[in-house]
Image: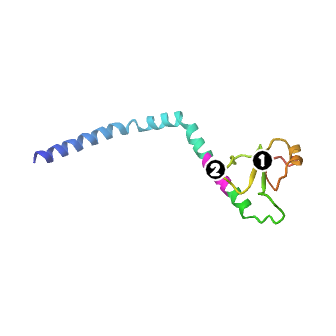
Amino acid sequence: MLQLQLKVKGASQLLYLLHGLRAFLPIFSLIYLLCFPAAQAANSAVQRDDQVNRIVSGIISFSHWPQLTQPPQLCVFASAQHLAQPQGPTPFSVVWINQTSELTRQRCDAIYFGDQTPQQ
């Protein structure tokens, strides 16, 4: 009987404490959002980069390159967003392009453009 009373008393104290903390939940949420928005955005950007990397890698890996004697080369414009340098080994090489004029000096088998205007 004594154990039952202690359990009930402990549970009621816990409920009382949780009820009191409920009033502070909006404040804690606001503080979290103000202090950690960059971490949330960075995590989202990393996930997006990973998704784009997998799609581009899949397209290049699936493509048939009958004339190539070496792995295909992907040229990535510096304006490209959501595409990061592959972390692991890939069946192709990656070259980052800063200026359009660099295209003539590279052997680009595939090109990944970022934000480009129609004039570019």
Residue at point 61%, 46% (across, down): 46
Find out whether residue 68 is within the magenta segment: no
Residue at point 62%, 45% (across, down): 45
Give the class, few, some or many, for how many residues have Cα within 10 Å of label 2's Cα (few <14, many ≥20).
some
Residue holding disc 1:
95
Marks 2/1: CA–CA distance: 20 Å
Taking the image as shown, residue 70 lies to the left or right of residue 55, namely right
Q: Residue 56 bears which disc, if any?
A: none
Label 2 secondary element: helix
| Camera-nearest label, 2 or 1 | 1
Q: Position of residue 20 (x, y in %)?
A: 33, 37
Residue flagged by tag 1: what amino acid is it? Val
Give the class, few, some or many, for how many residues have Cα within 10 Å of label 1's Cα (few <14, many ≥20).
some
Q: Is residue 11 above or below residue 59?
A: above
Residue holding disc 2:
48
Q: Which residues are magenta?
A: 46-54
Seen as rendered, the residue at the extreme left is 1
Residue at point 28%, 42% (across, down): 15
Find out whether residue 51 is within the magenta segment: yes
Taking the image as shown, residue 11 lies to the left or right of residue 57, namely left
Colouring scheme applied when the structure was drawn: rainbow
Q: Position of residue 22 (x, y in %)?
A: 37, 39
Main SS of the magenta part reads helix
Residue at point 59%, 46% (across, down): 44
Q: Position of residue 3 (x, y in %)?
A: 13, 46
